[in-house]
Amino acid sequence: MGAIWVAASSKVLDGCELERYGVDIRDIITVLFLTTMKFTHRVQVSLSGILLMVCLVPGIASAQAPGLSPIAAPNLTAGQIVTEMQGHNLARAAALKHYHSVRHYAVEYRGYAAKIAAKMEVDADYDLASGKTFRVISQSGSKLLIDKVLKRLLESETDASNHHSTELTSANYNFTLAGMENVEGRPAYVLEVEPLTENKYLYRGKIWVDATDFALARIEASPAKNPSFWISSTAIHHRYLKTGSFWLPAKNESDTEVRVGGKAVLTIDYGTYQVDTVAPLVAGGN
């Protein structure tokens, strides 16, 4: 069955000891992260638009957000904001010719005094004509997490544009305008999102839409449906940053509590982008 190192005691848990806990830690890791990866990836697809997705167009953000201060009352309805967001996303996607960045992936599980972790540095390149390519620059830590989680996540990104049933549209969500707040010094509309179906690849929570560019600036959400029995809760945090005319994912953090004990954390830092455009952007995609 192999072994899992326990950092605290510098010993190895064999199969029998794992069974005493009532569950194989490796099974938890596999179930937990493969489902979380799929959810995280599809969230990014829906949030960023056709090409502005987590893996396609640099990253997505998480991390704890700084304090936000209320600002002037909204001058648009929730429906108008969503329509503007979709149009602007299409315009940005059509104008994006090429990007390059170096991403940093990290995944860690802590439980039963055990710690399992892995890291991977990836050269990411996107071209409008040929699509995405990835090259692993370095990797370290658990081979299980590298092969079954981090590399699997990269593989799944190639199919991202084929999934439309999870997009951030009125066909999949109800939107409620909650007000306006500042995000990184820029006014943003705050929308509460509620999925129309209990789909584990949809989510419920809040999104922040930049009031000038109608781009996603921040997301705080959890799955609409628990993706696995082993998961008691998952909190997903995303943050986007503006690079030139584009709003690209900057960082993603997913924190998952395991039902039988322990916590798993996935972080993706999308690095600094080098972006080329096809033509000047036209507001709203017109």
Image: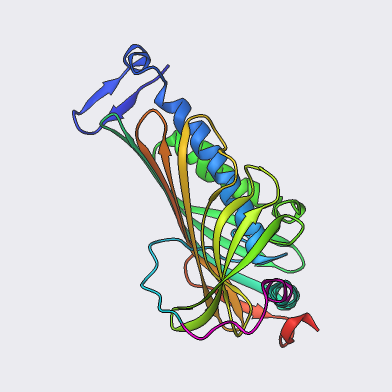
* Quadrant where the N terminus is found in the figure: top left
Which quadrant of the structure image shows residue 3? Answer: top left
| Left or right of 180 on screen, residue 86 | right
Q: Which residue lies furthest to the right in this view?
A: 286
Image position, residue 198 (x, y; %) = 66, 42
**Is 56 in front, or is 75?**
75
Which quadrant of the structure image shows residue 175? Answer: bottom right
Which quadrant of the structure image shows residue 263? Answer: top left
User: Which residue is drawn at the image coordinates 48% and 30% (left, top)?
Assistant: 230
| Left or right of 116 on screen, residue 26 | right
**Is 86 in front, or is 71?**
71
Residue 80 among magenta residues: yes
Q: Is residue 203 above or below residue 152?
A: below
User: Which residue is drawn at the image coordinates 75% and 63% (left, top)?
Assistant: 130
Q: Give the range drawn in magenta.
A: 71-83
Q: Which residue lies furthest to the top in this view?
A: 16
Say whether residue 46 is visible: yes
Q: In this view, does 150 lie above or below 31?
A: below
User: Which residue is drawn at the image coordinates 44% and 83% (left, top)?
Assistant: 185
Q: Which residue lies furthest to the left in this view?
A: 9
Image position, residue 73 (x, y; %) = 54, 83
* Quadrant where the C terminus is found in the figure: bottom right
**Is 82 in front, or is 1?**
82
Image position, residue 60 (x, y; %) = 53, 63
| Left or right of 145 on screen, residue 15 | left
**Number of marks in the image?**
0
Residue 55 among magenta residues: no
Image position, residue 80 (x, y; %) = 72, 76
